[in-house]
Image: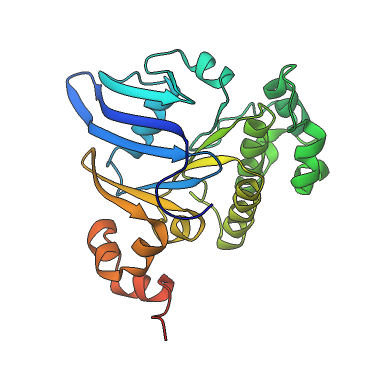
Amino acid sequence: MSEGAPAGPLLVVEGLNTSYGKISILRDVSFAVGAGEVVALLGLNGAGKTTTIRSVLGLTPPRSGSIRFDGLEIAGRPPYRVAQLGVGYVPEGRRMFKDLTTLENLQLAENGRRGDWTIARVLEHLPKLAELRSRKAGRLSGGEQEMLAIGRALVSNPRLLLVDEPSQGLAPLIVEDVYRILAELKAHGVAILLVEQNALLALKLADRAFVLDSGKIVYSGSASELRADRERIRALMGLTDAAVEAAAPPPAP
């Protein structure tokens, strides 16, 4: 999808305020995700990224604000209702049934739902899972568990996938595999809201980006422009000069 404002936003968040008890976490957060678009939600630890995803899902209901999915207000709806509308979730830490096999985890997530993303199709796109279909999830590596978490979300046939910290704790080569899978999903028209501590990695995949700082949006714009703006990345992400120089694209000739 081309960069810029999304055509026909699938998810629209406006004036979101979320608290844990008396502690305010999100302050007037507003953003949108277009159909088939990848949006990176970035920021330092504690900025409010995961709370934003939890608010959209209904896991942490917002104190005020609007969350519309395909034009329908979902703020405060229970998580299972949000999921039924077509919102998938790949949580931080994977959180699967470790005593069940790979296949059983997928079957439990599918739960009779019908759509293009069948278990057979997921195993075709994630062949490593097909090899591990009989292995218990608790015996999978971190990268294999991340793939299973993605596959588990896909069999619910989401129109929007919320992905929280997919590279956390994984070796670089495994991270490449995970991001290859996310790129394939993007090519198949699945919209993705991507929360990622590795900002430069997320910006390579995303169309647009939002940066949170202390619960407020402090940047909104093109992912490629943010990735090329070394000074802004350094200031907003707390990255070292060496990290920015190594990952930022070279200047145009």
Left or right of 82, for residue 129: right
Residue 96: give x, y in percent of width and height: 61, 29
Query: Residue 140 sits in which quadrant?
Result: top right
Image coordinates for residue 125, horizontal then vertical, percent:
76, 46
Asked if residue 249 is positioned above or below residue 120 in the image, the reply reads below
Above or below for 144 versus 106: below
Q: Residue at x 66, y 51 (%)?
A: 184
Residue lying at the far bottom in this picture: please name it. 253
Q: Residue furthest left?
A: 22
Question: Which one is nearer the viewer's eye here, 203 or 127?
Answer: 203
What percent of the width, then of the height, locates residue 12? 39, 31
**In this image, 130 relative to 227: left or right?**
right
Tell me the colour scheme of the image: rainbow
Above or below, comparing residue 107 to residue 172 in the picture:
above
| In this rendering, position of residue 11 left or right of residue 175 | left
Pick whichever, 193 or 139, lies toward us.
193
Tell me the quadrant of the picture where the C terminus can be found: bottom left
Residue 61 x/y as whole percent: 34, 18
Residue at position x 42%, y 18% in the image: 74
Q: Residue at x 33, y 53 (%)?
A: 221
Based on the displayed image, in which of its 4 quarters is residue 25 positioned?
top left
Total marks placed: 0
What residue sits 29% from the left and 57% below the top?
237
In the displayed structure image, the side of residue 110 where residue 202 appears, left or right:
left
